[in-house]
Image: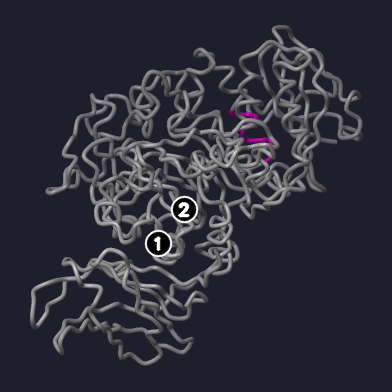
């Protein structure tokens, strides 16, 4: 379906009528002058059937009402509004008239913030280190918002993994020093939008209002304060975007604007979670439909992005979020279940408005070719994605995980990592993929490797030296544990020290074990070294075929050469510079980044260790 893009706007604004006491809801609360996207589709909700029959009038210099559309639900109408390039900031009065009487709402047009591409909407790249946290589980900086009257979920119990625990945005602000000293450049949080579901609101992925920030973590004011605090430090903010679904208590689900606003089925039909039918040349249409249009869960209704009004609603919110809160990057949840042509349009809308804006999508698939299909690639296929990068589950599941957990073999162990990276030729730019050891949906790395701290250190050293944009999950740096099964809440526990009653405090070191402090220092050492390493953050990668469990790769540019030596065997290994002359020629020694110790051009690396060496002449 072809249609002209405009923007869907909704806001909560009380109004007074001369003939009846009603109010309208518009999304969003405002727009801006001087936007490239200056045709705005305003979705208006009125709380009585027949509201969509009212006539509408706008009288504001530079603002033109192009079209009024009554939607299926008598409570909704859509207004197509054009904002001329020379329009001045101010309050646009929208009048709703019935039988000569009516009421009015104000829709603010604001001045755009300055600093596009410099202090915000900067994008993220391989020079960054992302820290992923869940606001409810990181730190409680403001106990006054632990519960909010009138919201459905009133739980507050840190002993229950699926209740709310009270963490908030003020808690994050309070510990930005910690993150910056750790070497973090970028913050990514699970969704911060309002989540007025009756339960399981701690994770944020079933939100109920696109244009409200969750009040129990501090609301819009605190989110903006966090964004400003990050940018003043030269740090960045990634927002977690969910286009595929909403929570079942979302206003557009409880009161659906159109019959096909959501994907409808005769009975509940969940997605198959199978990615193959999307690109399989032999796939049935019914399988492809179930993948894309099936609901993610019973509490997460699936949005119909082929409906142009839904598409505008989602695109509008994306741009509004960047402009409103100074977002730098976009992590897109459940990417493969979205309508992919819609996603191309949405991605382009963001980069047209914010040229440096970057996006990576959650592509939990199996096989490098499958993952590459969903991003910018070099594959000759009918559909070409414009998504810049993926959450690199291939480098994780078929790379570092078997490296740390399997014995070496022809196709096992570290050979899987080598093979997976060798398939990077499928991507337009593999450096735009986000790499990780664990996240909020996976068993934590320490538990995944059976509590072996040295394996975690190997994983960290790889994460911070290989290609791509590294993401560290909160608490990995202090050896937090957690198994995904039988409950994913076990990998989403509280960060030690985030609550005043905590005996153990990772922010100050109080009550921490020697092993936890050592790991924290290990991560900090590598992360801060990485910040200033042009070879790691911007340079090329060369890898050698693993031999008997020994895997050697290099990060290099004209200024610097870094030698990464991973010994996955259970025996010490002798390493000779001469075996890697393409990158070691002319170098006589290497300084161990973790320890500061210098080794010569012939050295022995212990079993189950990884060394990262800056080579010297």
Query: Is the image coloured rainbow, by chain, by secondary structure, or in one colour?
Result: one colour
Spot occupied by residue 313 in the image (x, y as percentages of width and height): 40, 63
Q: Which residue is mark 1?
A: 325
Q: Residues within 10 Å of mark 2 (few under 14, many from 20)?
A: many
- The answer to whether residue 481 is visible is no
Front residue of this view, candidates 407 and 7:
7
Front residue of this view, candidates 39 and 224:
39
Secondary structure at numbered mark 2: strand
Above-or-below relation of 144 to 1: above
The residue sitting at 66% across, 26% down in the picture is 399
Task: Give the left or right position of residue 610, taking residue 214 as reference.
Answer: right
Secondary structure at numbered mark 1: helix
Spot occupied by residue 190 in the image (x, y as percentages of width and height): 40, 43
Q: Quadrant of residue 366?
A: top right
Q: Earlier in the sequence, mark 2 or mark 1?
A: 2
Quadrant (top left, top right, bottom left, bottom right) of the C terminus = top right
Magenta stretch bounds: 460-467
- The answer to whether residue 404 is visible is yes
The residue sitting at 40% across, 73% down in the picture is 41
Residue at the extreme front of the image, as rendered = 266
Q: Residues within 10 Å of mark 1 (few under 14, many from 20)?
A: many
The disc placed on residue 341 is none
Q: Are marks 2 and 1 in contact (CB under 8 Å)?
A: yes
Spot occupied by residue 1 in the image (x, y as percentages of width and height): 54, 63
Spot occupied by residue 191 in the image (x, y as percentages of width and height): 38, 47
Task: Give the left or right position of residue 306, taking residue 457 as reference.
Answer: left
Q: Which residue is mark 2?
A: 237
Q: CA distance from mark 2 to mark 1?
A: 9 Å
Specify whether residue 463 is painted magenta: yes
């Amino acid at each position: 379906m072809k249609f002209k893009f405009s923007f869907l706007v909704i806001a909560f604004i009380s109004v007074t009528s001369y003939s009846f006491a009603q109010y309208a809801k518009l999304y969003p609360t405002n727009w801006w002058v001087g936007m490239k996207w200056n045709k705005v589709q305003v979705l208006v909700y009125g709380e009585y059937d027949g509201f969509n029959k009212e006539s509408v009038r706008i009288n504001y210099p530079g603002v033109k009402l192009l079209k009024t559309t009554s939607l299926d639900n008598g409570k909704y109408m859509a207004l197509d509004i054009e904002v001329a390039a020379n329009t001045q900031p101010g309050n646009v009065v929208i009048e709703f008239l019935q039988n000569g009487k009516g009421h009015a709402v104000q829709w603010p047009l604001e001045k755009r913030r300055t600093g596009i591409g410099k202090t915000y909407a900067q994008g993220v790249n391989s020079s960054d280190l992302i820290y992923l946290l869940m606001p409810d589980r990181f730190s409680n900086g403001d106990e006054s918002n632990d519960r909010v009257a009138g919201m459905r979920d009133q739980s507050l119990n840190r002993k229950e993994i699926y209740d709310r625990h009270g963490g908030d945005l003020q808690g994050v602000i309070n510990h930005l020093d910690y993150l910056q000293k750790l070497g973090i450049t970028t913050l990514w949080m699970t969704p911060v939008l309002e989540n007025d579901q009756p339960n399981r609101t701690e994770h944020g992925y079933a939100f109920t209002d696109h244009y409200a920030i969750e009040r129990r973590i501090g609301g819009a004011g605190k989110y903006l304060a966090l964004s400003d605090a990050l940018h003043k430090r030269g740090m960045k903010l990634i927002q977690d975007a969910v286009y595929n679904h909403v929570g079942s208590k979302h206003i557009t689900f409880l009161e659906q604007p159109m019959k096909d606003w959501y994907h409808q089925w005769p009975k509940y039909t969940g997605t198959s979670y199978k990615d193959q039918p999307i690109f399989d040349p032999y796939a049935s249409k019914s399988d492809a439909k179930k993948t894309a249009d099936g609901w993610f869960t019973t509490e997460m209704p699936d949005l119909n992005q082929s409906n142009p009004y839904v598409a505008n609603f989602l695109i509008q919110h994306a741009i509004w979020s960047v402009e409103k809160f100074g977002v730098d990057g976009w992590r897109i949840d459940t990417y493969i279940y979205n309508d992919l042509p819609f996603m191309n349009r949405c991605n382009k809308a963001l980069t047209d408005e914010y040229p440096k804006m970057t996006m990576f999508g959650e592509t939990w698939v199996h096989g490098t070719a499958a993952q590459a299909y969903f991003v910018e690639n070099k594959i000759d296929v009918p559909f070409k994605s414009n998504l810049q990068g993926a959450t690199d589950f291939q480098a994780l599941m078929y790379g570092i995980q078997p490296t740390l957990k399997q014995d070496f073999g022809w196709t096992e162990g570290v050979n899987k990592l080598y093979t997976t990276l060798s398939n990077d030729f499928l991507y337009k730019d593999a450096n735009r993929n986000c790499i990780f050891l664990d996240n909020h949906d996976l068993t934590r790395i320490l538990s995944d490797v059976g509590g072996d701290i040295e394996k975690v250190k190997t994983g960290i050293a790889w994460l911070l030296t290989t290609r791509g944009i590294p993401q560290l999950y909160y608490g990995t740096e202090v050896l937090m544990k957690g198994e995904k099964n039988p409950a994913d809440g076990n990998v989403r526990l509280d960060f030690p020290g985030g609550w005043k009653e905590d005996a153990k405090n990772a922010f100050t070191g109080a009550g921490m074990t020697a092993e936890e402090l050592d790991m924290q220092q290990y991560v900090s050492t590598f992360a801060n070294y990485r910040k200033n390493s042009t070879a790691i953050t911007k340079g090329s990668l060369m890898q050698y075929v693993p031999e008997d469990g020994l895997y050697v790769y290099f990060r290099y540019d004209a200024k610097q050469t870094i030698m990464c030596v991973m010994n996955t065997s259970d025996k010490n290994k002798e390493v000779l510079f001469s075996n890697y002359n393409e990158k070691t020629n002319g170098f006589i020694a290497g300084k161990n980044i973790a320890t500061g110790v210098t080794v010569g051009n012939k050295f022995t690396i212990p079993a189950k260790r990884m060394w990262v060496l800056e080579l010297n002449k």
